[in-house]
Image (tube, rainbow, N blue to C red):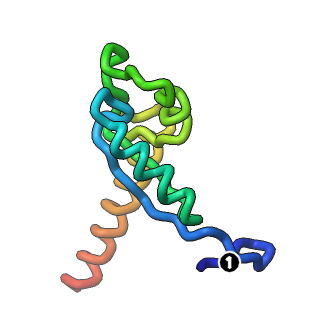
Amino acid sequence: MRADIAGKKAPPRIGILIPEFPGQTHIFFWRELEALRAMGIEPELASTRLPPRAIMSHSWSAEAIDKTEYLSPPTPADVASIGGELAHSITGGFARAEVAVG
C-alpha cells in the first residue's frame, strides 16, 4: 500500500477505462467496482464520454457519473493544458536538435 501525506496507509487504487459509461449494459462493471471497493481497493474511473441519456437507465447512473472522469469533450482548461505541453515539447525538441546538429 502507498502512504498518504500523513504517513498513513492509503488504500490501493486502480484505474479503469470504460467506454461511454454508464450505459445500459454496464451493470457488470458497476458490480465489479463495488466488489473492488469491498476489498479495500479504490477504483479511479475514466470513460471516453457520456452515453446518450436514453441508455442511462440504472438507478446508480448519477453516482457513476459523479465518480467518472470523462475524456471527451475536452474542457477549455484541458485544451489550454494540451497547448502548453505541445509548445514545451516543440521548443524543447528544437533545442535538443540544435545541440545534436552542433
Q: Is residue 61 visible?
A: yes
Q: Residue furthest right?
A: 6
Disc 1 marks which residue?
Answer: 3
Quadrant assignment, res 94:
bottom left
- Residue at 37% in and 22% down: 56
Q: Nearer the viewer, residue 16 or 97?
A: 16
Q: Residues within 10 Å of mark 1 (few under 14, many from 20)?
A: few
Viewed as shown, does residue 96 lie left or right of 4? left
- Residue at 32% in and 26% down: 51
Please, is residue 43 above or below residue 51 in the view?
below
Question: Number of labelled discs?
Answer: 1
Residue 28: horizontal and vertical position, in percent? Answer: 33, 44
Residue 30: horizontal and vertical position, in percent? Answer: 42, 43
Residue 37: horizontal and vertical position, in percent? Answer: 55, 57
Q: Please identify the quadrant where the C terminus is shown.
A: bottom left
Residue type marked 1: Ala
Viewed as shown, does residue 41 lie left or right of 80? right
Q: Is residue 83 visible?
A: no
Residue 43: horizontal and vertical position, in percent? Answer: 49, 56
